[in-house]
Amino acid sequence: MSLSTDYIKRLMDYLEREQILCTGEKLLLAVSGGADSTAMLYFYHRLRFVLNVTLLAVHVNHQLRGESSNLDEQAVRQQCHKLNIPLIVRTIDLPGERDLENRARMARFEIFSHILESYRFDKILLAHHKWDLAETVLLNLFRGAGLSGMAGIKPKQGNVLHPLLCFKPEELKDMLVQQNISWREDESNLETKFTRNRIRHELIPLLEKDYNPQLRDKLAEEANILNQADRYISERALRRYKKICLDNSNQRIVLSLPDLLKAPDIEHFYILREAYRQVSGQQQDFFLANLREIQGILSAQGSKYVSLPHGTFAIKRYQELVFTASPEDVQTENSEALPIESERSRAVHMDYRFRFKYLRVLPQDHLDYQGFRAIIDADKIKSGFMIRSRRPGDRFMPLGMQSFKKVKDFFIDEKVAKYDRDLIPIFDDGEKIFWICGHRIDERVRYTETTSRYLMIEAVSLSKKPNRAANRKKRGYDEFDEL
């Protein structure tokens, strides 16, 4: 049995074992011109009649290596012509050096997805091998990608297949040499300015030398075990996701927050990643850090949101967790100001219930009024005011100061988290901000010994259950007189 025949049998066994056989499907082969993708091209050339598949090769010229990039393209064209496989070439421009690896990957996948949809193909095949799998395990460990990331590159992830994970790179090159098939070497794979290359050429050799010569094999074995665990938990979590998803329309996912919090902690990552995927169309850029950000707003009081990659937002509102791609959703409740006329005694806005009282005398416990209760000189504000969220350029004169301060700087000094700032009610009489709810009144509306009329404002979060026993008053012991 020849080497290539033996490898093809191993490939078929792997495809069947991982349940990624694609008989009768239309397949896009991502071909860079390197040994790995050239081997994949040859394998599927041999298998296309056995599997009854339609093949289309796609090459992306990044133009990052000058003439070498053009020679890569030329080599792929020649190989596809020789094997009678149609080819599409796309050229892209990636200016700048910042985050080049990630931007190149995103650009490639955008091209693959567009061709997949335009030509009505079924799957995208990438030529990652066993050592790529081992490197990805370490890379994702450093990124904090959780169990799913530690499983490394998965044989099947949506419509993306990795059929060569059962091969070492040397095996693929040996097969190509036997078949007298040439390939291109990408010299940028040696540049240690890229994180993956540093892991490949510096970290792994060091670990193999000092700790375990079989490190790559062991990492690949662990990845396979973790992949099985990942699939098991993912299947359970996705069944729960379907039960707690209240709405799935117009790039907007709404999850029941109480039901989500009942789920085991280990399922949260999978449930939230699925909601993120449904909205953003991406999955690989949801990491453990994103999970922690979302968990941070779930445990906090009031409505809050976090920004996620690919223009996606997670918003906690009342008993719901909303994933959306629309920035307008973040501001919907906060952007409209609520007018408050002088005769109004109650209002609900921005996740708060407000109570207004005009008084003739100060309450005896007035010194305890702070945070979500404020007392001001009613004659120092205009008749009729509004409750709104912050706006660019907002400033006020914090109590105790004699100069103005930008609201943005005030929030920074108060250590208010970014995702909290748009959710804080601001009281504005048209001439000045006179109270930032939960934080500080304005110096210009403080009451003095000459004050004859007071306005007391109380704010209660709708998301936080009040301590009724502590707030209850006994009848007949009202400590102030209302106007």
Image (tube, grey):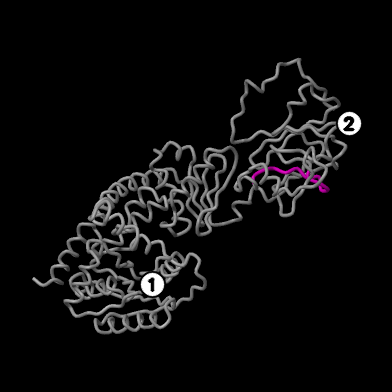
In this view, 250 is above or below 43: above
Q: Residue furthest left?
A: 1
Where on the picture, by quarter, is residue 165? bottom left
In this view, 250 is above or below 338: below
Q: Position of residue 260 (x, y in %)?
A: 45, 40
- Name the dominant secondary structure of the magenta segment: loop
Dot 2 crowding, Cα within 10 Å, few <14, some 14–19, many 20+: some
Query: Would residue 291 appear left or right of 441 to someone viewing this image?
Result: left
- Asked whether 427 falls inside the magenta stretch, the response is yes
The one nearer the camera, 377 or 404, is: 404
Question: Magenta residues?
Answer: 423-433
In space, the residues marked 1 and 2 are separated at their CA atoms by 75 Å
Disc 2 marks a residue whose amino acid type is Thr
Dot 1 crowding, Cα within 10 Å, few <14, some 14–19, many 20+: few
Question: Quarter holding the C terminus?
Answer: top right
Residue denoted by label 2? 451
Residue denoted by label 1? 188
